[in-house]
Amino acid sequence: MSGSGEGWLSGELNDTAGMGSGLWVRGVDYMAGWRVARDAADHLNLALLAAEFEPSELRAVAATDNDGCGVVRLVGLPRATVRLAGLLQRLADGDGGAR
């Protein structure tokens, strides 16, 4: 693993299967978009860990769209996504996400 977060934070390097959902276009730099998405996913995963989510229940995964732009997908168990939605709603309501 490196300091860039390769590994358990945003998934192993073989998660690059998430790069694009269709055919790859010659000349499009999918790796550059994926690297940007991986960094963003790492930031989100650290925040999820701080909020006491386990990577096995909820995590951000780096991918790219068909144009090579990075995207971050949130993958998780339904109960974890409902818990996250509740935390975000409480933050939006102004109570700081208190449980």
Image (cartoon, grey):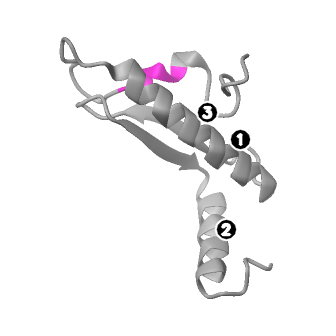
**Residue under label 1:** 56
x and y percent of residue 66 in the render? 24, 31
- The amino acid type found where label 2 is placed reads Arg
x and y percent of residue 29 in the render? 31, 18
CB atoms of marks 3 and 1 within 8 Å: no
- The amino acid type found where label 3 is placed reads Ser
First of labels 3, 1 by sequence position: 3
Q: Is residue 75 left or right of residue 19?
A: right
First of labels 2, 1 by sequence position: 1
Q: Label 3 vs label 1: CA separation?
A: 12 Å
Q: Label 2 vs label 1: CA separation?
A: 14 Å
Report the front residue among 18 and 68: 68
Q: Residue at x 18, y 17 (%)?
A: 25
Considering only vertical position in the picture, is 69 above or below 16?
Answer: below
Q: Which residues are magenta?
A: 15-19
> What is the secondary structure assignment of the residue under circle 1?
loop
Choose mark 2 or mark 3, whichever is in front: 3
Considering only vertical position in the picture, is 33 above or below 79?
Answer: above
Considering only vertical position in the picture, is 35 above or below 83?
Answer: above
The N terminus sits in image quarter: top right
Q: Residue at x 65, y 78 (%)?
A: 91
Report the front residue among 62 and 76: 62
Report the front residue among 16 and 3: 3
Q: Label 2 vs label 3: CA separation?
A: 20 Å
**Residue under label 2:** 83
Q: Main secondary structure of the magenta part?
A: helix
Considering only vertical position in the picture, is 57 above or below 35?
Answer: below
For label 1, the crowd category at 10 Å Cα-Cα, with few meaning under 14, some 14 to 19 and many 20 or more, is few
For residue 71, which quarter of the picture? top left
Q: Is residue 40 left or right of residue 53?
A: left
**Residue under label 3:** 10
